[in-house]
Amino acid sequence: MPMLNTSSLPDLIFTVLFFFMIVTHMRDVDLKVRYEVPQGTEIQKLGHKASVVHIYVGRRMNVNDNLNDNVNENVNGNGEFFIQLNNEIATLADIKAFLDNERSRMNSEDQGRMTVSIKADRDVPMGLISDIKQTLQQNYALRINYSATERNVNVNENEDERR
Amino acid sequence: MKMFRRRRQEVPQLNTTSTADISFMLLIFFLVTSSMDTDKGLTSQLPPPEDTTEQQEQEVKQRNVLELRLDADDVLTCNGEAISNDELTKRIEEFVANVSDAADLPEKSEREVHLIGKCRVSDRHIITIEADRQTTYNAYFEMQNAIARGYNNLRDRLARSRFGHAYAVCSQEERDAVAMVYPKRISEVRSEK
């Protein structure tokens, strides 16, 4: 029996590879804040990655390894919590410019369903979150998503993963 | 003459048998790295910003309001009494559904809902949330999770009884119908403390 001609196999694989490279997005944000999101049971997947904007809130990650440095530099009005937008630490006032910037990068369809994903550490005080939400509200970024990881429910209930 | 012919025939060609292996490796690399960051979370819709000039002072009846507060020590109180998140879920279900039309639970109105028909819809209830500025985000999130759970349980039950399948697998129309029977009416109050 003649063997199958597999000389075109690499071409097929390259096609599939390019497909994945174009369809998926690899987020390459340089995280400057450390955060651990809360856990929830009612969470859903975020659709349409192109229309999602991320805001990170957490404790500063120290690049220099001086353990004693933590105490002084990181205290600001919000305890030790900082907001990160794209790759830089930012303040509340920077959120507006950031939103306008991100909006202009989206096409009109995505703009209508723009969602802001808030990735905040569990211990962040609500005052800061509340201020962020108010800023978003004033800039008409009304769809928000509190980022969280899945938590398993107790034995008695059957939770289907919500798609 | 013979030498030239041999050299032309014997030009070494690149050995491409390993191309397939290389491409498999790249493919697996991309499959693994791109599937890692699956973003999930609790969605929420903020109301449009209010103009300070148009303050709507609505008379809201006591029976229609469920007041939730989180204080600086992450203690959750509902209408003044401290409760846990699981109890909150049950409380929300009982409050929003008001199955027995009790006088101390929200009013319901008779509405015509597409796909479900005439039914009593709880559209006057309001859940107010106030969180102290020092509350941890985790406590707030757990509370929002419990509330979402309550609504999801109610909607799921209705979807199963009317449409025969879970709310999560309903079509958009069916979801809208169920959401109309149990609308999420949540008001967040900003705390100045």
Image (tube, rainbow, N blue to C red):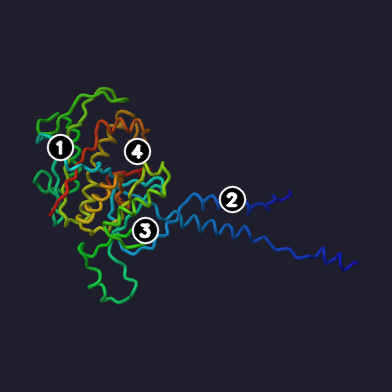
Q: CA distance from mark 2 to mark 3?
A: 32 Å
Query: Percent from the top left, x then y, of residue B37?
Result: 40, 55
Judge whether B178 appears above or below A65 on screen: above
Q: Name the kind of residue labelled 1 in the image.
A: Gln
The residue tagged 4 is B168
**Residues marked 3 and 4 touching at CB (< 8 Å):** no
Q: Name the kind of residue labelled 2 in the image.
A: Thr
The residue tagged 3 is A86
Chain bearing tag 2 is A
- Earlier-in-chain disc, 2 versus 3: 2
Query: Percent from the top left, x then y, of residue B166?
Result: 33, 35
Q: Quadrant of the C terminus of chain B?
A: bottom left
- Earlier-in-chain disc, 1 versus 4: 1
**Residues marked 1 and 4 touching at CB (< 8 Å):** no
Q: CA distance from mark 3 to mark 4?
A: 33 Å
The residue tagged 2 is A15
Q: Nearer the viewer, mark 2 or mark 1?
A: 1
Q: Name the kind of residue labelled 3 in the image.
A: Asn
Q: Secondary structure under badge 4?
A: helix
The residue tagged 1 is B56
